[in-house]
Image: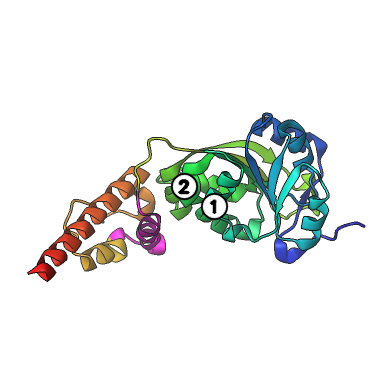
Amino acid sequence: MKHIPRKRFGQHFLADPAIIDAIVRAIDPRPGQAMLEIGPGLAALTQPMVERLGRLTVIELDRDLAARLRAHPQLDVIESDVLKVDFSQVAQARAATKIRVCGNLPYNISSPILFHLLPFAGVVEDQHFMLQKEVIDRMVAPPATADYGRLSVMLQWRYAMEDVLFVPPSAFDPPPRVDSAVVRMLPRGDFAPLDVDAFSELVRVAFSQRRKLLRHSLGKWLDARGFAGDFDVQRRAEEVPVAEYIALAHDLAALDDFAAAAASMTNDK
């Protein structure tokens, strides 16, 4: 029975053999590697991947598609919303210290998925995702460009990223109304450890009024936290390099630690 794509799941299925082959070559799966595919759909990418891997874990929310996938002897199917999946547990289940992650992500929730994966970067070897081209442009954007924003800062803190393949709408059934691309994401080994939620809040505030100088948004937020350090708020958010946001987050964490230690000393008296 032919599967009818469901709009609520943002389903657009890869159907171009040349594009599928190019994606598999970009990912370069090897026998025995622990790999997880998000949103396998009709298995267009799944089948050539599992032929090279030997075994593949897939996450599929659509129960009809999940039932089809379970019939495949080389697939381990997790029927779930990907935003509820603990990727550390997936790595443990595969007896792997690192897992490789790939997928054609639903475009309507691609950013939430990318943010959900951030805390699990330590158990990930690499990630290859098909996304809306516009989103990938934002992911890899340098400072002082129109595309540079919250997504750029949060992901560049934790990953080295590369746009590796352009994918036209005609490669899908049904065709989306946007261009697509494949991004390669390599977790950085030299990243500065941060509290993800605290860093996310800092960056969110910075870009909340991106057309105004930071003194109108982040400056007030920093004042409310008693920050008196050296950070120039006479700039717009898009002019601040990732490294400066990271340094500011570390300064704030040190300030919070100092305040907590002082409060503890006061309570002990």
Q: Position of residue 183 (x, y in %)?
A: 59, 40
Q: Which kind of residue does numbered mark 1 sit on?
A: Leu
Q: Secondary structure at mark 1?
A: helix
The residue singled out by tag 1 in the image is: 114
Image quadrant occupied by the C terminus: bottom left
The stretch of residues the image draws in magenta is 194-214
Residue 209 within the segment the image draws in magenta: yes
Residue found 11% across the figure and 68% down from its top = 268
Q: Is residue 33 left or right of residue 261?
A: right
The residue singled out by tag 2 in the image is: 155
How busy is the neighbourhood of tag 2: few (under 14 within 10 Å), some, or many (20 plus)?
Answer: many
Q: Earlier in the sequence, mark 2 or mark 1?
A: 1
Q: Secondary structure at mark 2?
A: helix
Q: 67 or 28, which lies in front?
A: 67
- CA gap between label 2 and label 1 equals 8 Å
Q: Position of residue 96 (x, y in %)?
A: 56, 39
Q: Which kind of residue does numbered mark 2 sit on?
A: Leu
